Image: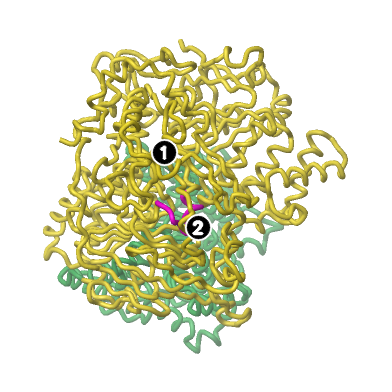
Amino acid sequence: MNERVTDPSQNPGTAPILEIENLSISFFTRKGEIPAVMDFSCTVMPGEAMGIVGESGCGKSTVSLGVMRDLSNIGRIVGGRIKFQGRDMGDMSDEELRQIRGNKIAMIYQEPMASLNPAMKVGQQLMEVPLIHDKVSKDEAYKRALEMVRAVRLPDPERMMRSFPHQLSGGQQQRIVIAMALLSKPALLLLDEPTTALDVTVEAGIVELVKGLGKQFGTSMLFVSHNLGLILETCDKITVMYSGEAVETGRIEDVFDRMRHPYTQGLFRSIPLPGADKNERPLVAIPGQLPLPHERPKGCNFGPRCHHFVEGVCNAAEIPMIEVEGHEGHFSRCVRFNEIDWAALPKGAEKKHEPVKPGAPVLKIDNLKKYYTVSGNEIFGGAEARVVKANESISFEARESETVAIVGESGCGKSTLAKVLLGLETASSGDVVLGNTPIQSTAIEKREVDTISSIQMVFQNPFDTLNPSHSIGSQIIRTLEKFGIGKTVADREKRMFELLDLVKLPRAFAVRKPRQLSGGQKQRIGVARAFAGAAKVVVADEPVSALDVSVQAAVTELLMEIQRKNKTTMLFISHDLSVVRYIADRVVVMYLGHIVEQGSTDQIFAPPYHPYTEALLSAIPIADTSVVKKHIVLEGDIPSAMNPPPGCPFQTRCRYKRLVPDNLCETKLPPLKDLGAGHRSLCWLDDAQLAAMEPVISFDRGVNVPVSDVVPTDEPHGEGAGTGPGFAGAPPQRPHGKTSDADAESEMERIERAPPPPHGSREITGNPGDSSPDKLQTEVGDGRQAVSGEVTPGLGKTRQSEVDGNEPNRS
Amino acid sequence: MPTETIGALAIIIGVIGRFWPVWIALAIVLTLSFTFRGRLGLYGQLFESGVGVAGVTICFFWLFTAMFAHVIAPFDPLTQVAVMKDAMPGTVVPDQGLVYYFGGDKLARDVFSRMIFGSRIVLIIAPAATAFALMVGTTLGLPAGYYGGKIDALLSFLANLVLAFPVILLFYLLVTPGIVETGLPHWIARVFFIVPIIFFGTLFFTRYKNRPQLLAVQMALIVILGGWVYLGLAFDADPLGIISIDPNQLNIFVAVVFASSPGVFRIVRGLTMDIKTRDYVAAAQTRGESPWYIMLWEILPNARGPLIVDACLRIGYTTILLGTLGYFGLGLAPESPDWGTAIKDASRLLRSFIHPALPPVVALMTFVLGLNLLADALREQSLKD
């Protein structure tokens, strides 16, 4: 019933490495058969990378396990075929499959430590691969292993070979896992969320490595991820999955710029791409939630959540993959994609908000320090005490109704800061003033009820934030009781129902247990609880990072809506700069306990940067084909807070270090340099060097335009220039649904209007550090901009009025 | 000498017949449980696996046997019928027409009736002692795990001391007349028995502090009921004269609680250390909850899964421990029908007569097996969710 996605014209004469035809996989549990994957087809050519993207529970990992034929005892392939190098894997014996696994097909999982044997040295584990699969001598195996450790760019390979896995950092472990997978020279590499457990700057390094694999080793890849940006950076083709089915598949450019399935479009609308703005162009969440596997609707699985749903058309029969005309190898599982107006916004999504005016400072933090003493045994003494400097001289202010983002990777001290603010820890020195009350040394037990209820927290992990033993209602009522809200039980119950209304959950949820709720719903309860006592300050610790993309947008919007209504100050802790740019008014960047840079969102996202901010910005995968990013990959890992480097905390990984005279970086802590208008940076670089910095993210100027004509419309330091905060180069004024044909048109128009350029955004200048070996400067999107040119211009014209500057939306 | 006996088949039919109240009760309870298993939570899920059904059935079998012991047993466990000394199984008692199904022991008592009545002692002491051990272990394990540091080091050290002490020697010491005379077991009992009152008091106080009326009622109930039971058990001074405990049984009780609390302590401590890192505990802290509220209402309910499994296994160990104590002749009165004492009595003549030893052995074995099966099934089911 389903056409296979093949593309014989592209690689004439080459046979595909992997062909999956109408694959269906079911799990057989005590509740009966649960179909996990239905009618899934894809083809991977030699050296090609196929990305599979989708939300949790969509079956993307099951596909990769199905390819490995590793479906535990309850999973079974119930239909379709998987052909590997032309042979049907269903016909192979167990012996043959064993030969293939780990030899011709290798797999890399999310958790590197789970893939390594903790009792064996890294070298031995690596040597095992050639010893077993190629039956080579020990010396030869050692040689090959060492070579591979070098190839995955690990420092000091000999030492690495002698280490145990636990002695390496997460990023190094994942590199070893990749090295192990590559040692057998596999024809196909399966990567299942290989970087999800890693920090962004470490992730960037792994992505850089993975990207080159296809070229270097001729390996094909099946890259499973929930992150569209990562897929864009690493893959050639993409398959979007939803509820067990592939809903859209095609080349990256086609799917990203001219998606022909409403779910794909919904995904793109719910992630904060550059150009989204919390006031002007808020995110559009996909309504509803993923259907349970045994409650899938008839016809289109996405039907109940789709705003293009038509009764009798979408739910009439099961929908096959339909080829999109004019796009090579582009298929969509939507019957209406030719009728849908891809630029139209769903109803009610055109909401705009007045920018919030921040009021008086609510929270003042001055020179806050938090040191921990780590000692040995409590009774018998033992090892000498060591000091962990979790926070070093933290100073910033947060004003009423303002969102201050605290950005940093794991171990930067942002969670410790939150603990001090909430009173779970007391400060070692310095001041924290909430309203007019100093709270730095008042532990939570000694705080007044008012103080407690006016600074509250939203936690990161939705599956952990609610006590699984108590009902939702009783947990909220308990909070109200603690905050002294309501005199009687009935009062509190009423207030509890109001809070459920506030976070847009049905009142019936009051009697439910947390396990009956989805992740997003749990997080809403977490929000309700934080706002239960009219909190003045809410600390949100990565509140959406554990949620699925479509749910993230809804929770983010909810959080901002309540904040707007209550004039709450929000401290938004995150490592994801895309979300931060979207949600925050001001940003504080932390590294190893220090604030390395702070300023308004515009200031942080435009040069001059702190070198660390620059690397962080460059590390974030952005799911936008028109974005051009400078790639800066940091060497090494974050040093331990137990043993911080002398001088500047960032000096061990900084690529600007050699520009500073007298070895200052390694000896003296840099001053907090004021760059004007509250923008401060902890760096030794002088003004000239800072001014020479280039924007990390800029917009590809689109079609057939000479580079020199490319024009950013706002000043590099632009404040209030009306465009997206702080990006050099104007964000393309594309409508919410990115229709590239229309894009191209509007792009052209604006370029003609634009003033001459101060600098070309695609030009690679003699940037200091260019020659430095630890910097890899590449431009994502190279060769991709041409795609837009292929589109027949006729379509674009008809929708010009809507596209041009979003006029209809603004009225 | 009586000569009239019945055959093996008749014995089996007769024994099955004597258990009639148990069969009826089992049929009713199991049918109801199976029918409504969807609404019974974890207990209902037990009926989804063969192991679970077997475990539940065996445990219920012994529970109902203990409840209906008077109806099932044809004889009083202490009555001696002189002619029946060492009688073979199936011997008919002259003049009465009743049968010693499993024969008579060396004191001419009915082995079958003694086994039935023995279940009463085992099924009262073992679960009760386990419950107290759980309470004591939990009350100490929670703060050790939650606060860590010095409190943890001290309590863990004490627990290790008790664990390192040979259990049998400990029991010998506790029931030695010299030690009993010093009143030490009584004092330990007074400490142990006050723990549940403190436990429940803290439990309700932390939760309903802000609702004084409700709290007053609860506190009054705890003090009156708990105090009443406490006076009866610990001081044998129940004003109403209803609650009392045999001094021998008290010794056994204290010894068993003392020996198994450290095990519970370790489990609770470990679970607490794990659960206290969860976000909901941090959420409770950030809204200003007291440490004991967090321990009792946020942490303890989420530790219940492993604790229930452990409790099942622990009742089994305690049953075996009671058997061991009975075997050494410690604690309970020499004529007590409990299984351990019965095995000891029978073991002396094992070479000549094996039949008095077998019924208590099989009883002990099946009960412990049933509890282990139940624990297995509970563990499996709680992992599935």
Q: Residue furthest top?
A: A1
| Residue type marked 2 | Tyr
A66 inside magenta stretch? no
Give the camera-side residue of B205 and A39: A39
Q: Colour of chain A?
A: yellow
Q: Residue furthest bottom?
A: B182
Regarding residue B114, the answer to whether it shows in the image is no
* Image coordinates for residue A721, horizontal then vertical, percent: 28, 48
Q: Which residues are magenta?
A: A606-617
Quick one: quadrant of the C terminus of chain A? top left
Per the model, the C-alpha gap separating discs 2 and 1 is 22 Å
Element at label 1: strand
* Image coordinates for residue B318, horizontal then vertical, percent: 52, 63
* Residue B83 located left or right of residue A36: right
- The answer to whether residue A228 is above or below residue A32 is below
Regarding residue A801, the answer to whether it shows in the image is yes
**What chain is the green one?**
B
Mark 2 belongs to chain: A
First-in-chain label (2 vs 1): 2
| Residue type marked 1 | Phe
* Image coordinates for residue A256, horizontal then vertical, percent: 42, 29
Residue at horizontal 37%, vertical 71%? A395
Residue at horizontal 41%, vertical 45%? A758
Give the camera-side residue of B146 and A151: A151
Mark 1: give few (<14), some (14-19) or many (20+) Cα within 10 Å.
Answer: many
Q: Which residue is mark 1?
A: A699
Element at label 2: helix
Mark 1 belongs to chain: A
Residue A612 tag number: 2
